[in-house]
Amino acid sequence: MAMLTILDFFEQSVEKFPNNTFLKEKIKDQWQATTYQETLQWSKSLAAGLIDIGVKPGDKIALLSEGRTDWVIAELGILYTGAANVPLSIKLEPYEIEFRLQHSESKYLIVSKNQKSKIDKIRNNLTLLKGVIYLDILEEIPQSDFQFDDLLNSGKTLLKENPLLLDPIRAKITGSTPVNITYTSGTTADPKGIILTHRNYTANVEQAYSLMDIPETYSTLLILPLDHCFAHVAGIYSFMGKGASIAFVQLGETPMQTLKNIPINIKETQPDLLLSVPSLAKNFKKNIEKAIADKGKFTERFFNFALKTAIYYNAEGYNRGIGFRILLKPLVKIFDKILFSKIREVFGGKLKFFIGGGALLDIELQRFFYAIGIPMLQGYGLSEATPIISSNALHRHKLGSSGFLVSNLEIKICDENGNELPQGQTGEIVVKGENVMAGYFKNEKATKETIRDNWLYTGDMGYIDKDGFLYVLGRFKSLLISSDGEKYSPESIEETLTSKSRLINQIVLYNNQNPYTVALVVPDKDAIKRLSQELGLSLEDENAQQQILRMIHDEINQFRKGGKYAGEFPERWLPSAIAILDESFNEQNKMMNSTMKIVRNRVYEYYQSRIEELYQSDAKNIANPANIAALRNLSRN
């Protein structure tokens, strides 16, 4: 029988697996485990404490914290009061937090000590907030505020006095009761608050189970931010429903220290699967390649040969070892035993696969991880669908695709007029199912534009092949448009250029009915420094700078006629003029959002003058003064 609420779902697991470890976090040098039964007790204690300070069904309580055991207890505690959690990204700036708290009408905010300073800066502007609840013990707090531990303890006492305190509220919580108001990144306008209900979440978890099996012995390390529904569904709730366990990355004194804890924590926790996004996957790959290169030229050459052999043998996964490729099987087995198995030990030795979400995952990345024996299974979804729509799975996959549709979900591909297109044709991805959001909070207009006759119009472009695999090509709003009106999605070109080009770290293409396509390129600073050392060049020398710039241009030209990768993309969408940038697209400069996607409109707006210069008569010469200056600045930073 379908579980209509998260609380049904949770309590069912508590009954089945009361003593299984659910949550793990590292405090100082020790991993501390919390069982399913303990999580239930603490969550109910918090709910009673929240009710005691005036929280009522239908209220909104915001949560701003790094991933930790108390994050999950806080969300469950909020749900037991009949209120909704407004999860906030720790990467948000104070003004962004202010908008979300005011717009969501949040009554209280639960916050960690590392995020407290952001709230202090905007506290006087938060006219609807009754108080702040601090996850970490502080010596002094305002009279209107509370310590998290105090609420747990007072709630525990209240439940002892009245064990049935939560029952009347619990009885009124249904599948349509909101769980979260989760905000979009707001790349083009004010962010929209997506209302996700109990049934949205339980339906999507049930759908996720059609893609993967999670035995109760499984564990994961949640690296992705908990405020996003991908981590909610594929992480917290999918594991919760099977009695499996979740660990959190140890919090460092600084964000950089927390990042450094990730590989350490992976080895310690030995996860069976990990959730990933492209930026994280690229970092894993880069670290593996660096570790191999550090062992010397022979090891590097051997690794590259083994990798190339395994990639050829695996093909697109579904056709692995087919035909004469079967002859390579003994060799691939040897490589796996003596080389790839050692690499897998870096990930704890038990890792079976990654689940890839977020932006499009380049096929070369997928092939790399497949070759070393840890497939990175690309999926597709969006927050408005809670978020999972499709994914590759161990038992059924095609590298390069976004996988097959989850169970109990309808899909159609539509043209610009909303007409359904035949299989194989490209159009907008439109879906219908119980995982589709309830709507946007206080934005009926946007809700009606996005959900029509119960169908969610995703704004993403794609097609379905003859085997039922979905291929996602990018956002309609980010399309390149040529002077004759032809359209093309840039994401796949950008991902491929960065993955196959040694010297390019990031690239954004542009064409808005212009004579040709242009590109904003952020070179890979470390790769350029290594190359200059290999060639005996000084990056302070203008001739050397010109030589490096031409080599960047040559890498892009490998995709043109006569090049190594010729024919992968129509040449009209490859950049004819290139602007070199001396600063990466990142969260600090707002060129990248909290889910690590480049905010294209913001990039175009900020670099408008550079883009305009790329359509001048001499712009096609990459070794121009502006690019030389940018390369020089980049190498000095």
Image: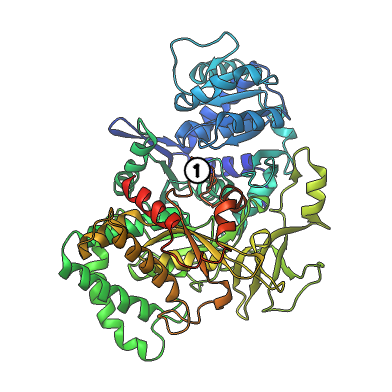
What is the image's colouring?
rainbow
Q: Quadrant of residue 195?
A: top right
Residue identified by numbered label 1: 587
- Residue 23 percent location from the top left of the image: 44, 39
Front in this rendered view, residue 397 or 508: 508
Please give left or right for residue 311 compared with residue 85 in the image: left
Task: Check the picture and name the quadrant holding the C terminus.
Answer: top left
Front in this rendered view, residue 336 or 52: 336
Q: Quadrant of residue 565?
A: bottom left
416 shown above or below 505: below
Would residue 392 be seen by someone viewing this image from the given angle?
no
At x 34% / y 87%, what residue is drawn?
A: 326
- Residue 506 percent location from the top left of the image: 45, 57
At x 67% / y 53%, what residue is drawn?
A: 385
Give the crowd class for mark 1: few <14, some 14-19, many >=20 residues within 10 Å: some
Look at label 1 and name its amino acid: Glu
Please give left or right for residue 91 compared with residue 632 in the image: right
- Residue 61 percent location from the top left of the image: 64, 28
140 shown above or below 399: above
At x 32% / y 66%, what residue is drawn?
A: 547
- Residue 423 percent location from the top left of the image: 70, 78
At x 68% / y 51%, what residue is drawn?
A: 384
